[in-house]
Image (tube, rainbow, N blue to C red):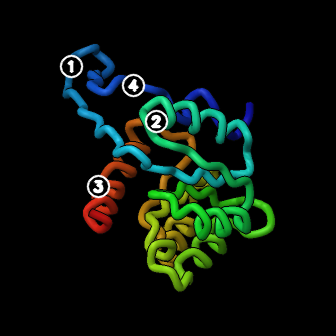
Amino acid sequence: MSRFDFGRIFQRHSEQDVKQVDGGEVVAKVDRVKPEPGTTILIVDDSKTIHLILTRQLGGLGYECLSAYDGESAVTMAQQHKPTLILMDVVMPILNGFQATREIRKDADPAVANIPVIMMSGNAQPTEELWSVKIKANAFIAKPFSDDELLSLMEPLLQSQAAVVG
């Protein structure tokens, strides 16, 4: 059994999704926020499978996606493209996610330094969540996660980012 459940990392739901409990009762409808044109997500992970899944799902929801496979490339891409949000894996080659986020936060350009970052980890330990706070990541999510879990972290960050830019 692999340590990562690829089938559950991101399961697509419709914009008006009906949440159900085990008994099949309708609990609530979730209204998804449509991304503004040009909303760009930088996906940083050393797994090509993660990139494929997230790019398909987020792209299907209207987000533009960029990919970086290590922390060093993530820093460079953040500086060059100034994405709206970064999904940053923790364990990667060259620079890990903590080191890359720290470099992004130190950038002289506020448009780079203030990009919201969501840390992702398949090895969610309390120390990883603590380091995420320490390096000023905006949120932390443990893999595997559902689309609702990820979008519930992303959407408020994107809305607050739009308020700052707009």
Question: Which quadrant would residue 114 be assigned to in this image?
Answer: bottom left
Q: Quadrant of the N terminus?
A: top right
Disc 1 to disc 3, how far (Cα)? Answer: 27 Å
Q: Which mark is residue 13?
A: 4
Residue 76 on image: x %, y %:
67, 68
Q: Which mark is residue 8?
A: none
Mark 4 crowdedness (10 Å alpha carbons): few <14, some 14-19, many ≥20: some
The residue depicted at 33 percent of the width and 49 percent of the height is: 155
Q: Earlier in the sequence, mark 4 or mark 3?
A: 4
Q: Earlier in the sequence, mark 4 or mark 1?
A: 4
Disc 1 to disc 2, how far (Cα)? Answer: 18 Å
Residue 162 on image: x %, y %:
30, 59
Q: Is residue 63 above or below residue 72?
A: above
Residue annotated with mark 1: 26
Task: Name the kind of residue labelled 4 in the image.
Answer: His
Given contact means CB atoms under 8 Å apart, are the residues at marks 1 and 2 in contact? no
Q: Which mark is residue 159?
A: 3
Q: Earlier in the sequence, mark 2 or mark 3?
A: 2
Q: Earlier in the sequence, mark 1 or mark 3?
A: 1
Looking at the rendered image, the disc whose residue lies closer to the viewer, 1 or 3, is 3
Looking at the rendered image, the disc whose residue lies closer to the viewer, 2 or 4, is 4
Residue annotated with mark 2: 146
Disc 4 to disc 1, how far (Cα)? Answer: 15 Å
| Kind of element beneath mark 3 | helix
Q: Earlier in the sequence, mark 2 or mark 4?
A: 4
Looking at the rendered image, the disc whose residue lies closer to the viewer, 4 or 1, is 4
Q: Closest to the observer: 111 or 94?
A: 111
